Image (cartoon, grey):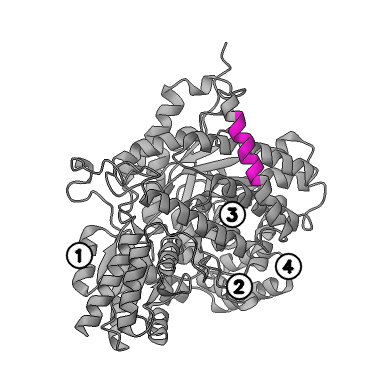
Amino acid sequence: MHAQKEQPWLFRTYAGHSTAAASNALYRTNLAKGQTGLSVAFDLPTQTGYDSDHELSKGEVGKVGVPICHLGDMRTLFKDIPLEQMNTSMTINATAPWLLALYIAVAEEQGADVSKLQGTVQNDIIKEYLSRGTYIAPPKPSLRMITDVAAYTQKHLPKWNPMNVCSYHLQEAGATPEQELAFALATACAVLDDLKGKVAPADFPNMVGRISFFVNAGIRFVTELCKMRAFVDLWDEICESRYGITEAKYRRFRYGVQVNSLGLTEQQPENNVYRILIEMLAVTLSKKARARAVQLPAWNEALGLPRPWDQQWSLRMQQILAYETDLLEYDDLFDGNPAIDRKVAALKEGARAELAQIDAMGGAVAAIDYMKGRLVEANSDRLARIESKETVVVGVNRWTEAAPSPLTAGDGAIMVADPDAERDQIARLTAWRASRDAGAVTAALTALREAARSGANIMPASIAAAKAGCTTGEWGAMLRQAFGEYRAPTGVSRSPSNRTEGLEPIREAVDAVSSKLGRRLKFLVGKPGLDGHSNGAEQIAARARDVGMDIHYEGIRLTPAEIVSAAADQEAHVIGLSILSGSHIPLITETLDRMRAAGLGNVPLVVGGIIPEEDAARLRAMGVAAVYTPKDFELNRIMLDIVGIVDAQDRAA
């Protein structure tokens, strides 16, 4: 006899682009199609606390999400969407207190009962230092702001999830399942340890119950399913033994999932449909470890921004599994399975050992350098296995011959960001600044900076600033003044790894060119703009180091001016830029102009990123020596290319 049919998980589509008005139209369409929750993607300036007209925002406005500069933008984003009835997930971390403040202000304007608001702010800053790069402040004040938000919601928004521990990007950065388990759980412990002092002991169990997780599901779906069962067990164990939570409902592992984008391929992209489906099974098949909310990437994500139809196709995949199959009519299908039990036990053992190591170092905040180094190493191992074909990726390193895909044929196969969106957004921002009460803004910002400095909860001052008409960049500037700027570790150590597979001939080529140059070949790796996806840049820098090049890599979020200045100081022989946010044309145009102005016009520039072929051709015409996209997974071949480019330049000179 099967059990009563379960309710399905929340169906979400991660969406937001170009402008608040365009995103609002998309949300209303998706809600009409049967989506049951909103998941808001913000652009990089919004995520990093800059206004759309800031120097670092150039080319990034509205690219990977929606730009929200002030209360007017937030009003437009949720126009005619009753927030009291919504469940809204906002993927926002460093600026989470600010975006939640704007959301509360709009809800109040709509006449909503704020205590009924439901949703989540991701608000996980530790993964920003480890893998995503959209931090503002140093770790300690950032942790304090996470718990400020939690303590505020406990009092005023009891149904809101104030913190969503995000292990998603850890896997994208190369984490093993054991590392993903341990690093995420260590982050949750750091938050709860800090939160303990901010809420009454009687309210603490309920706050533990409001912590949720956002997890990645990769293609090794049996391992991933076991990872989810391990997460459930370990969290229960930690809540009971470390925090003394006696009520089972507060120890439940509540999680949403976005299945893996790392494994989506530019080659034969239609294969990604099957990958996404299989990855979804890992987080839905086992009732005990089933996600509460699922969002799926689109099949063409490795090519560019998905269109509404692509997102609809991913939504249909969820609906078919939930409503056409009989999955939700059964108890857990895996209980008592010896193979599953063995794998879960092994994952828990590995995660506990990793957790003990982090605890011994003083917890997640103290162990950021250690964790970052572990991720870069794990990612190097993952890539080396793909290069050596030990890990098979269909259409990439095996079965690469294929009929051309009709899905990618013709114009409009990929959505292109609206080139006028940035101008439009800046014009509205300028008008907003001109129309507000300057005195009220100044007073609100002064109060915000004082709250940050004094240690008072950041939320009341943030909500007051939102209502006074302050902007995202002004809020971010106050935090930078109060807490100082911060640059996270790169995880790329100075000493070469002991990986030697296939490196000897490249090392010899590097030595030969270096002796011709009269010094070691100097390779400067840079990440201009606000794109914090640093995995590619780290792997290029690490491999260049391993083949004997002298590398200079300072990490993320540099202006073209800073990169060119460093290239002049370092006397670089070649510059490599990594840009994954789609802002490659404006950033590279500026970099090339500045290189010529600085007398570095003869230094070759190579570029990597998610770059459509017509853009790649345009970049080469502008003078870029080589363009690499996700299909170029053989790092050794890229290293040989770079040696050849420097050698040719030296001969030409």
Q: Is residue 313 visible?
A: no
Q: Is residue 278 visible?
A: yes
* Three-letter amino acid code of the residue under disc 1: Ala
Q: Calculate the distance from the C-alpha at mark 3 to the C-alpha at mark 4.
A: 23 Å
- Per the image, the residue denoted by label 2 is 479
- Per the image, the residue denoted by label 4 is 456
- Judge left or right: residue 172 versus residue 593: right
**Can you say which quadrant of the picture contains the N terminus?**
top right
Q: Calculate the distance from the C-alpha at mark 1 to the C-alpha at mark 4.
A: 53 Å
Q: Is residue 260 above or below residue 629?
A: above
N-terminal label among 3 and 2 = 3
Q: Choose mark 4 or mark 2, whichever is in front.
A: 2
- In this view, the residue in front, 11 or 177, is 177
* Three-letter amino acid code of the residue under disc 3: Glu
N-terminal label among 3 and 4 = 3
In the image, the segment drawn in magenta is: 341-351
N-terminal label among 1 and 2 = 2
- Per the image, the residue denoted by label 3 is 108
* Residue 367 picture quarter: bottom right
Q: Choose mark 3 or mark 2, whichever is in front.
A: 2
* Three-letter amino acid code of the residue under disc 4: Ala
The picture places residue 281, in percent across and down from the top left corner, at 47, 32
